[in-house]
Image (cartoon, rainbow, N blue to C red):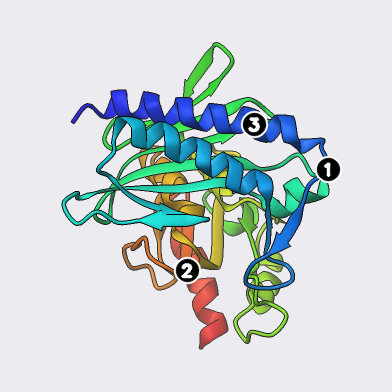
Amino acid sequence: MNLQAILAHMEEAAREAGAYLYEGFSQQKTVDHKSSAIDLVTEYDRGAEEMIVSRLTAVYPHFNLLAEEGSRNSTDSPYTWIIDPLDGTTNFAHGLPHFCVSIALYEGNTPLAGVVHDPVRDECFTAVSGQGAFLQQGRSKQKLQVSTAETLVQSILATGFPYDRHTAAVNNVAQLAAFLKKAQGIRRAGSAALDLAYVAAGRLDGYWEFKLHPWDVAAAHLMVLEAGGLSSDMMDHPLEIREKIGMVASNGRIHRQIIETLAEINS
């Protein structure tokens, strides 16, 4: 399997969908709700997904599909596309220019390739298993490398909050309070895929979040690993890409400190 050739198709699909989202960003949008009043979806989520799926299935018709707005399974293929056509829908719907397209290819639970494309900044993050992670911006291409922060007080962390946070006991509020007392800073930007890509790029030092979906993290999870970082579940076990993921990602140096801080809340 030529993963670089597949990555090229993934990047083309992500850029095409990104251009569509960028064009629609300033337009009037129709906003619907999914699991709750704060779980939004727009016609641009659906339109971008249709574009991505159409382009990829034209070349790889037998791969499975796991996407935010729809899935398809084929019993004879070990390969699965994991797609978030618009990560950061709430930002997009409110006119905040921080969102992206995320596409990953997995073989079972093993990540093979990933693309996270930010159409606003024209930043395209890519990774191939065993071949590193990169950032392409215009004609410039640079290899990604995680940061060198050694302690939480030296670190900027990112996080997010689940859509059931108004009613659920596990809503990340206690965890946020704990990290506010330990870290140099906390950022909540509204796109898990970009948060993780920024960890891979060394812009952020660590990340934690509860109740994530596979499409939120599948592509950028690989980028963190290929850039020299670590990712795990909340108990520091190997990450499994499945429904309702609790995830920690970091530069590796502060990973245990994040895990221990989370454990303090549950003790």
Closer to the chain start, of discs 1 and 3, is 3
Task: Classify mark 3: helix, strand or loop.
Answer: helix
Comparing 128 with 181, the one in front is: 128
Q: Is residue 124 above or below residue 250?
A: above
Q: Please give the label number shown on residue 20.
A: 3
- Which residue, given by chain and number where applicable, does mark 2 sit on? 246
Q: Is residue 239 above or below residue 218?
A: below
Closer to the chain start, of discs 2 and 1, is 1
- Residue at x-position 73% and y-position 54%: 90
Residue 251 picture location, percent across and down:
47, 48
Comparing 191 with 264, the one in front is: 191
Residue 78 picture location, percent across and down:
20, 50
In this rendering, the label closer to the viewer, 2 or 1: 1
- Which residue, given by chain and number where applicable, does mark 1 sit on? 28
**Horizontal side of residue 70 vs 42, given as left or right:** left
Comparing 262 with 209, the one in front is: 209
